[in-house]
Image: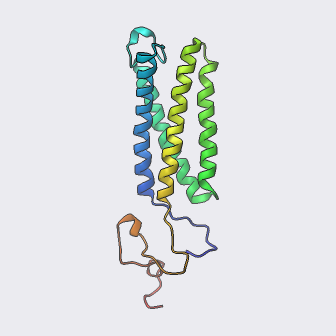
């Protein structure tokens, strides 16, 4: 890679495995948040009070939506890393604004105020967790080249073909 290229090699395995882990964390944030708001604070969010501390099937769907949102955030980050300048800055802005929408949305529903605040706080924590985790995984998923001109082994970050250097990977014969 030279200084004029726009390619930014991304370790997709690292990015997507981090995205899957983020999806699990996001779903658990929803479950723990619901348990805390319903069980500890006694505020009925996502289901009527008689549904128990973890709510009902709506809570499971809510957790699943958070997991899907984390995977969508990972896809967005992957696209930005490959195609956009200052990808992580754009990612933070996009996810921040989506999180703001998720925080404001409960206040547009016809529920009591405490339930609206509880749901908004759960959405905020889930959005912040997704933003921080995917952003930090992306920082480690960008493959850094040696900018002093030395050739580094291609595909070493994937754990395959460790003896192939960049020139050979491009099809140039060795010894040039």
Residue 71: percent from the left, percent from the top?
47, 43
Q: Quadrant of residue 95?
A: top right
**Residue 83 placement (x, y as % from top left):** 60, 58
Q: Report the label total.
A: 0
Residue at position x 42%, y 55% in the image: 14
Name, please, the residue furthest toward the front: 40
> Outermost residue toward the top?
50
Q: Name the residue located 54 percent from the left edge and 43 percent from the top edge.
A: 131
Q: Is residue 26 above or below residue 168?
A: above
Using the image as rendered, state which of residue 21 and residue 5 is in the foreground.
21
- Quarter of the image for residue 96 reads top right
x 40%, y 32%: residue:
28
Percent across and percent down for residue 40 are 42, 17
Q: Seen in the image, is 132 located left or right of residue 25?
A: right
**Front residue of 99 and 56:** 99
Name the colour scheme. rainbow
Please say if 92 is above or below 107: below
Choose top left, top right, bottom left or bottom right for residue 105: top right
Q: Quadrant of the N terminus?
A: bottom right
- Kindly identify the residue that appears in the image at 39 percent across and 69 percent down: 156
């Amino acid at each position: 890679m030279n200084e004029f290229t726009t390619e930014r090699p991304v370790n997709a395995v690292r990015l997507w495995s981090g995205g899957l882990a983020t999806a699990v964390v996001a779903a658990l944030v929803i479950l723990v948040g619901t348990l805390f708001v319903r069980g500890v604070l006694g505020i009925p969010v996502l289901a009527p009070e008689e549904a128990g501390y973890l709510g009902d099937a709506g809570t499971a769907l809510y957790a699943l939506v958070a997991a899907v949102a984390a995977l969508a955030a990972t896809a967005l980050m992957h696209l930005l890393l490959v195609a956009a300048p200052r990808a992580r800055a754009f990612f933070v802005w996009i996810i921040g604004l989506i999180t703001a929408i998720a925080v404001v949305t409960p206040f547009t529903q016809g529920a009591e105020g405490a339930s609206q605040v509880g749901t908004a706080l759960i959405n905020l924590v889930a959005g912040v967790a997704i933003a921080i985790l995917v952003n930090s995984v992306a920082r480690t998923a960008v493959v850094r080249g040696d900018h002093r001109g030395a050739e580094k082994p291609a595909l070493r970050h994937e754990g395959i073909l460790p003896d192939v250097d960049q020139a050979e990977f491009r099809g140039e014969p060795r010894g040039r």
